[in-house]
Image (cartoon, rainbow, N blue to C red):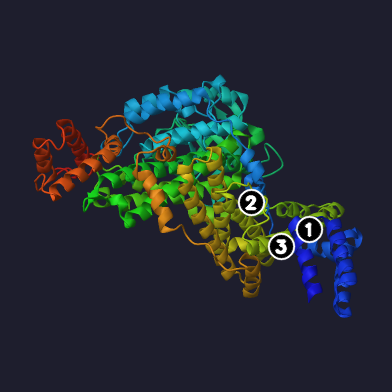
Amino acid sequence: MLALAIFFVAFLALGFKRVGFGGWTVGLGVTLLFITFFVKTSPLILAILWLSTLIIGVIFNQTTLRKNLISNPMLAFFRRALPSMSQTEKDALEAGTVWWDGDLFSGNPDWKKLLEFHGPGLTKEEQAFIDGPVEQLCAMLDDWKINTDLNDLPPEVWKFIKDNGFFGMIIPKEYGGHHFSARAHSEVVMKISSRSVAAAVTVMVPNSLGPAELLLRYGTDAQKNHYLPRLAKGDDIPCFALTSPEAGSDASSIPDTGIVCRQDFNGQKDVLGIRVTWDKRYITLGPVATVLGLAFKLYDPEHLIGEQADLGITCALIPTNHPGVNIGRRHYPLAIAFQNGPNWGKDVFIPMDWVIGGQQQAGKGWRMLMECLAAGRSISLPALSVGGAKFSSLSMGAYARIRKQFKTPIGYFEGIEEPLARMAGYTYMMDAARTLTADALDAGQSPSVISAILKYTLTERMRRAVNDAMDIQGGSAICLGPHNILGKLYHAIPISITVEGANILTRSLIIYGQGAIRCHPYIFKEMLAAQDSDHARASADFDSLFWRHINFTVSNMSRSLIFGLTNGMGANVPDHKETKHYYQQLTRFSAAFAMVSDFAMLTLGGALKRKEKLSGRLADVLGLLYLTSATLKRYEDQGFPSADLPLVRWACEQNLFEIQQALDGILNNLPSKALGLALRVFVFPTGRRFTPPSDNLGRKVARIILNDSEARDRLTKGVFVPKNTTDQVGRMEAALRMSDQVDQLERKLFRARKEGEISGRVMSEMLEDAVRKNLITESEKAFYDEYDVLRKEVIKVDDFAPDAFKLNPKS
């Protein structure tokens, strides 16, 4: 038994160190020599161990034998099992880059690489725009008026947005745009969204998935020179029409078509062009757009531009005043007044040079769209979500301190502390992931898998944060009016959840479905090798990849087991006292995730994409690993502020618990129960030991947003806070800053009344008597009266005339 134990330990150690083929041969050989000469062992066991080592050595080091016996049969099996890959699917898989998501999928994340990574940050010009025009725009916005009275942005707001280049943030300066970084783009959208979702959506759409980005990447010089200056100045308002009634989540199956043909156009004879028929809906800015980006399937039955009849998805730009273009009426997305609606056309002729990029880009639209989705998923929607979460934390922290029951701020009750802590903890990790991803984009990355992670995880946590805020504010949150600062944000939650790939689809199919192939170090390469028509090259490539893949899996099994037994000891992580444990656990779970992924793909193959609950749980693990990585990096980047440590601990402990639960769900639901039990030994060798954050930690987190402090300012940085007390948020912040002094004054008065020094049934009577008896000064009473005016306005619920909600027959 001792010999077997020594051999097993050596096997684990070699796997842990990720040695190469030669390392395995030498390592096991040396181990067996030691056992043979120094450990008393039965001849049978010794023979079995030597035979096993010999087989491993031959397999690893005799390429021809290995290929004939194992690799080539596996290649044949892989080819049979591998589902056919269309060009559309290949384009989607190849879009974007692999970055930190690849490290998380490796089982051995390089923390030094992550912590040494820093984006360029905001330039002085970008910061000046945020402090100037963005601040001015937010001050102009009256969300109640926008969504209730006008159902649109006011004309002066539209003019301000256009005049200050909000539609041209991503457009280069030579075309009249600002050419802002992804980080600046994100900061702008986040601040505006903390004031008005309708305004934020209006600003973010032209700067995310839309004509400007497509033109910048793929447009011809003529198209750029014509459209980009007009888009930058707001002379043209863009929209992009992708979603069809029959193709929502399955956007690649859009039924809209274009037929290559020749036709007279604008006085010219026999112009090469396309006859397009389409029917689109849910098109943001569609009702007011002057230029329509359109995606459709292009066919060339007469082979006018090539040998293929089915060219694939194509993107074109069409002026909305072009004959045959029908801009429909407006949709009404949950009473949030951004412009959104359908459009359609039948047999509308457009010249070929209206295709984005011209004729040479015909049929390449799907790849174009996949590569451009990063803006919507990585910048706009995450920024909007973080804006909503920050606003909820800021406003409800203040409200819970100001609003009192039983002479105590409601935020001090444990039932309120729990959602406050959740809001603050989510906000911290969300903002960390937002800034890390924006910085990665500015550094030249285009991480498609991370963009999907960010879209899903941040919109879902924004949903929870806003729901918690609604619960805290209670009855006044469900009565709409100018004093209700949460109602319209609550209405907007499903919009973020639904657009740019519905969250159910994103979680169950996209994150892991794409991540398992793109981020895994071998899967995609193995797939390409299997599809190679050159059999000799395919055999050589597959053999090399397959055995490195086997070594990768064995290594992750070893690392997962060892880290599980040692609680992460031995992991190569930063040696920071407060956070080292969290880095160790992330490394452990990275190895476990990589191992479980390999076995899930091995046993289910192409069927895994139909096991959407399993795929969703695997997506949860990958997403949580990313959020926690970003959380730890943010804490270090900001210089380890001790006041923020409760937020870091809460986020990490919550995420580690959720990772544990997701992995447990995967193991419980693998089709092979035996495999699930076997893998459980490697994933949870000492059981499931992670718990959610403690009540005491939650209390510390809640207190951060209940008090005016630097930690609260860091957490909510970037939110628009009005400087006047005629605005509800401005009142809240002013009252919060007065709360400590008011609490001291109240305690003094209540103690004095208890001791018989003053009398009075209500606070106003107590104040008057305290002034008469020189217990407090007139200025102290005036201070309290000023606070009380603010407090009453903060908790006020709007009411309306009986006929205020009668329908307008003209509407």
Q: Earlier in the sequence, mark 3 or mark 1?
A: 1
- Residue type at mark 3 is Ser
Image quadrant containing the N terminus: bottom right
**In-image side of 167 versus 616 (left or right):** left
Residue, disc 1: 546
Residue, disc 3: 558
**In-image side of 743 versus 13 (left or right):** left
* Local crowd size for mark 3, using a 10 Å CA cut-off: few (<14), some (14–19), many (≥20): many
Q: Is residue 9 visible in this depiction of the protein?
A: yes
CA–CA distance in space, label 2 to label 3: 17 Å
Picture residue at 83% right of the left edge, 62% below the top: 71
Residue, disc 2: 104
Counting from the top left corner in percent of width and height, residue 34 is at 87, 67
Q: Nearer the viewer, mark 3 or mark 1?
A: 3
- Residue type at mark 1 is Phe
- Using the image as rendered, state which of residue 502 and residue 228 is in the foreground: 502
